[in-house]
Amino acid sequence: MERNAVNNSVTFADSVGSQPNAISFRSIVTATVPDGAGRGVPRIIADLVDQVGAHAAEAHARGADQAKHFSREKMMQRKYETEAQATEVLKEALWLAWVAAGGPRGNGVLRDNPSAQKEQVWDQAYNLKDYSGRGLTDGMNLNADYVFGRMLKLRIRRPDATTLEIPDFDPRPDYQSWCIKYPSFDALFDAAEKTKV
């Protein structure tokens, strides 16, 4: 974080390290404090921004820890006879999770599409349309973090066309909102297989 005494602003990098965000206190102070009053207000606001920045850094660290946890986690493999069968089970599991999630979380309301159909949900998740799009390193994996604003955190590896690797840990309702209905990854994929295998 960098302070600028000339224009009374604080600049800090956001959690993904892209363009820095700048918060200017001049307009806040001008709008809320009459001339000559509350000379300590800029310091209070600066302290608040420091606290927000610290919380953002902690949240970013927790997210990085979660990603490391996921990458080290044991995975269970599910094998299918054909590529089409594996894809259909994966699509159905994604759909069941999306429906079970119930609705958007936080700023997800901006991307909410309550009338989305299964193929739209698949396209949105598989092609990472809630984010910057699918990259070359994504392979055949599914990384359904937020889909149309619903928090799924459903990351499935696909090492080959007929194999799905699903996490071997218990999902958390504060992270995988679908787990209220399906208490485990196994339960989710068992339900998907009942309709597609």
Image (spheres, rainbow, N blue to C red):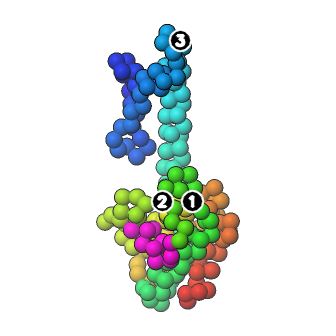
Mark closest to the chain's N terminus, 3 or 1: 3
CB-based contact (under 8 Å), mark 2 and mark 1: yes
- As displayed, is residue 68 above or below residue 103? above
* Residue type for callout 1: Pro
Q: Which residue is mark 1?
A: 104
Mark with earlier residue (2, 3): 3
Q: Secondary structure at mark 2?
A: loop
Horizontal and vertical percent for residue 148? Answer: 49, 63
Label 2 crowd (10 A; few <14 / some 14-19 / many >=20): some
* 117 magenta-colored: yes
- Check if mark 3's residue and mark 1's residue have beta carbons within 8 Å: no
Of the residues shown, which amino acid type is indicated by label 3? Ala
Q: Return the x and y of residue 152 as percentages of the image width and height.
A: 55, 63
**Where is mark 2, residue-wise?**
111
**Which residue is nearer to you in this view: 60 or 163?**
60
Residue visible at 31% across and 66% down in the picture: 136
Report whether residue 24 is seen.
Answer: yes
Up/down of 163 relative to 133, above or below:
below
Q: Nearer the viewer, mark 3 or mark 1?
A: 3
Q: State the separation of the CA atoms marked 3 and 1.
A: 43 Å
Mark 3 = which residue?
37
Pair 2/3: label in front: 3
Chief SS of the magenta region: helix
Q: Type of residue at label 2?
A: Arg
Q: Image quarter for residue 74?
A: bottom right
Q: Quadrant of the N terminus?
A: top left
Q: Alpha carbon of mark 2 to alpha carbon of mark 3: how far?
A: 42 Å
